[in-house]
Image: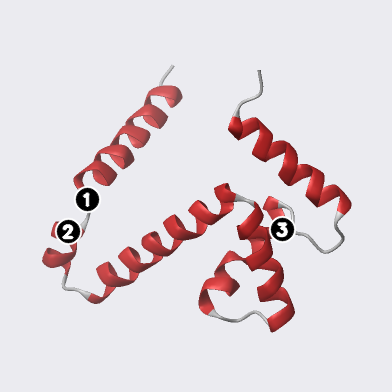
Amino acid sequence: MITRRKLRWRIQHWLEARLPGLLTCAQFEALVDAYIDGELGPVARATVDLHMRTCPVCLRYVAAYRKVRDMAADTLTRPEAEALVAIPEDLVAAILAARDAEAGRKTP
């Protein structure tokens, strides 16, 4: 049985293979910064918009990427004490867990 996720993936890759000018997810990812900053021309912006309409994964990626950039910009503009309060606890826990896991791999 095919799931909705697999079906979307198949449709996306079928479109990428048959429609000239449609971005792959990797090409899309390379343009995200310029897209969010409004640095793309009208044709490139329309191409990115089309990819986001056909790829829900990349649409969610842009939304998350914007949140991270906004959080980083907000954190950098506040005094250090306020910035530490603004960082979500689950993010701090994930960073510390990743650091500990990396340290555990390096120890023989």
In-front residue for pair 61/70: 61
**What is the three-letter code of the residue carrying label 2?**
Leu
**Image point (88%, 51%), residue name:** 18
**Image point (27%, 71%), residue name:** 74
Q: Seen in the image, is 102 located left or right of residue 2?
A: left
For label 2, the crowd category at 10 Å Cα-Cα, with few meaning under 14, some 14 to 19 and many 20 or more, is few
Secondary structure found at label 3: helix
Which residue is denoted by mark 2 in the rendering? Answer: 84
Q: Quadrant of residue 94?
A: top left
Q: Position of residue 29 (x, y in %)?
A: 62, 57
Q: Quadrant of residue 59?
A: bottom right
Q: Going from the N terminus, do you reach mark 2 or mark 3 first? A: 3
Secondary structure found at label 2: helix
Which residue is denoted by mark 1 in the rendering? Answer: 88
**What is the three-letter code of the residue carrying label 1?**
Pro
Secondary structure found at label 1: loop
Q: How far apart in space, not on screen, are marks 2 and 3 (Cα)?
A: 35 Å
| Picture layout, residue 4 above or below residue 82 | above
Which quarter of the figure is the C terminus placed in?
A: top left
Q: Going from the N terminus, do you reach mark 3 or mark 1 first? A: 3
Which residue is denoted by mark 3 in the rendering? Answer: 27
Q: Position of residue 86 (x, y in %)?
A: 18, 60
Q: Position of residue 34 (x, y in %)?
A: 59, 74
